[in-house]
Amino acid sequence: MMRAGPLFAALSASLFGMMSWLSWTVLKPQTGGLAPFDTRVLGYTLAEAQDYLNHLDDTGRAIYLVEMRLLDTAFPIVFACLMGWLAMQLASWVHPWSRLMLVLPAAGYAVMDLCENALVAKLLRAGADGVTVEMVSLASQFSVTKWLLLLVSWALLAVLWTLRSRTAQE
C-alpha cells in the first residue's frame, strides 16, 4: 500500500497537466481568456455561462465534452485517492475505522467534481440559448462545493501533517 501514494501522485500530476494544457491551448484562447466552468472557484451566473458558451465554437465544445471530460472523470477519482491515502498515512496513530472518517472530505470532493462534470456537459449541450437559470445555478453550486471540499481536504492534511510532526518531536 505504501507504493500507492507515488502512483496516485504521478497519475494526478499527469492528468492535471493534460487538463491544464487543453485549457490553456484550446479552451481559454477560444473564449478570449475566459476560465472554463470547472475552474471557477466562486461559481458563475447565467450571464457568465452564456458569455462563455457564446465564445466556445464547435471544436472547443467537442474537446470540452470528450477529451476534457474523460480526463476530468479520472482526475478527481485519482486525486481523491491520493488525498485519502495521505490522510491515512499521516494519521497512522488513529484507529483504522476512525481514519476512514478523515477520507470523507476527499471522497466528497470527488463526488462533487463528477456531478459537476455531468452538469457542465448539460450546459455545453444546451448552448448559450438553451441554458436556464436553474441549470447554471445547480452546476455553479456543485463547482463551489467541489472547491470548498478540496479546501477542507487540504486543511485536514495540513492539520494531520502538523500533528504528526509534533508527535514525532516528542
Image (cartoon, rainbow, N blue to C red):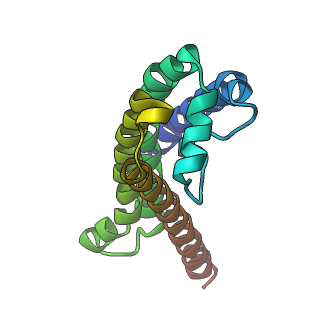
Q: Quadrant of residue 31?
A: top right
Q: Residue at x 52, y 19 (%)?
A: 63
Q: Quadrant of residue 89?
A: bottom left
Q: Which residue is drawn at 43% across and 56% down?
A: 137
* Residue 1 can be seen in this image: no
Labels in figure, total: 0
- Above-or-below relation of 123 to 141: above
* Residue 146 can be seen in this image: yes
- Above-or-below relation of 96 to 1: below
Expressed as whole percent of the image width and height from the top left, the position of residue 116 reads 40, 46
Q: Residue at x 29, y 74 (%)?
A: 98
Q: In this view, does 77 lie to the left or right of 34?
A: left
Expressed as whole percent of the image width and height from the top left, the position of residue 5 reads 48, 45
- Above-or-below relation of 99 to 74: below
- Which sits in the foreground, 34 or 1? 34
Q: Is residue 87 left or right of residue 26?
A: left
